[in-house]
Amino acid sequence: MRDLHWLLLYLLAVVVVTLIHQPYYLLLGLLLVFLLSGSLRWRLLRKAVVSMLLFNAAVSIGYLAIALMRDEFRADYLLLINSRVLLLVMLGFWLSARINIANALRFSSTLSFLTTLAAGQIRLMSRLMVDFRNAFESRCVKRPNWRQRSRLALAQTEALVEHSHHAATEISQAMRSRGVFDD
Amino acid sequence: MHIPDGFIAPQCYLPAYLVAGGFWVWASRDLRQRLDEETIPRLAVITALAYVAGLIMLPIPGGSSGHLVGIGILGMLFGIRLAFLAYSLVLLLQALLFGAGGITALPVNALAVGLVGASVMTLSMRWQNQRYAVFYLTTGAFLAVVIPALLVALVLGLQPAIAHREDGTPLFFPFGPEVVVPAILLPHLVIGVVEALLTLAVWRYAKRRGWLNA
């Protein structure tokens, strides 16, 4: 199956998942995705749990506290919301591990182009941020104060804005020199 | 600030896709005519900038931190259409490429943060006058964080009323606006102030470099 078909199947699955309100069907779906994920299954499950943990824990604990106070607690709601979110996140990770998004978006050459360029720049800029953070931490003996952390945020932002201006010109020149814009 | 996947009912996110689709067409209308050697790289780089801006931690007085929303800076430097498209593309990449965020929450996040946030900032820049430039800029940057946060909170707060069982048990997000609005808005009032100061610093930097009319 082509990447575009997997993408469309994923989008359909997402809508279907949000139309199901029986937690046991969602858990069944989760089991299915888990089994279909092959050798990646434990890694994807761990990533999915970690990425949803903070927000879902806050919502679940908040619901528990408020519902108990109002005497409206429903355990199946907690099961429903957590299994749905886990299934959706797992589906998303499974898709991103399974297909090449640039291939899937090839139906629009502009979108495919943009995605490839943006993904490359995101990796570059993320590395720049990590370098900034590491350099900052290596220079701090004590825990940095508010003023120092503010200066770090400002320096990072300025560096990003600067980088983005130069990168746009560089990419444009590189593409032109390779004949990308020749008709 | 943006909403994760699984908390928005289809009765809400499917119409939101229609509305967002209309705005995507509007935002890319001009672009389509000038998708040339400068526009494509520029949009790609702005998208990356919008994504990575979310990785910058803003120190909040008291020792904690939040992350930069960045839509004020994007709106200020690139205008509504490019900022909205870039932010929407960020959400798409987060969902499809990095497995974060989500497809169901994408249109609501794009409209609230990308469109409304960028519009607030761009309008405040347009109304800016020489005498009160700093006031307009910082107010715009502050509101570009706070108004989208309020919208996101309201959309989340409406979910129990939109989708629930017969006995009233919610099917998606469980809290009404009376709980979720203060929970989301209060931290964003602080983040908004810090982000406004940061936007002011970037504005001065961009002005020195002559980038503001780019």
Image (spheres, rainbow, N blue to C red):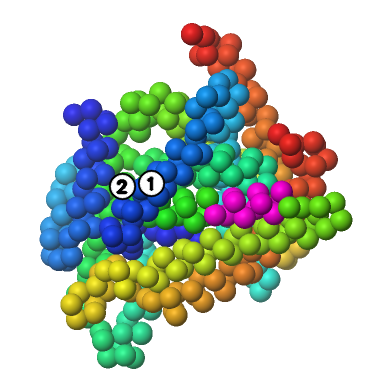
Q: A169 or B177: nearer the eye?
A: B177
Task: Decide if residue A3 is in sight here.
Answer: yes
Residue A92's mark?
Answer: 2
Q: What is the chief secondary structure element of the magenta stretch?
A: helix
Is the Cβ of the residue at disc 1 closer than 8 Å to that at disc 2?
A: yes
Q: Is residue A176 above or below residue A17?
A: above
* Residue B214 on the magenta segment: no
Tell me residue B119's x, y (percent). 59, 51
Q: Is residue A177 above or below residue B167?
A: above
Tell me residue B198's x, y (percent). 71, 55
Residue type at the position of mark 2: Gly
Residue B95's mark?
Answer: 1
Task: Output the chain of dot 2.
Answer: A
Residue B52's mark?
Answer: none
Q: Is residue B18 above or below residue B210?
A: below
Residue type at the position of mark 1: Ala
Residue at the (62%, 17%) spot, across then down: A173
Residue at the (59%, 31%) spot, across then down: B42
Query: At numbered mark 2, what does the secondary structure look like: helix, strand or loop?
Result: helix
Task: Read off the magenta span.
Answer: B116-126
In which quarter of the view is residue A175 placed?
A: top right
- The quadrant the N terminus of chain A occupies is top left
In which quarter of the view is residue B11 placed?
A: bottom left
Instruction: Report, in whole angstroms, how far the alpha carbon at label 1 lies from the one at label 2.
Output: 7 Å
In which quarter of the view is residue A69 placed?
A: bottom left
Q: Is residue B118 left or right of residue B206?
A: left
Tell me residue A73's x, y (percent). 25, 84
Tell me residue A126's x, y (percent). 56, 42
User: Callout 1: 10 Å neighbours few (<14), some, many (20+)?
Assistant: many
Residue at the (66%, 62%) spot, across then down: B142
Q: A115 or A94: nearer the eye?
A: A115
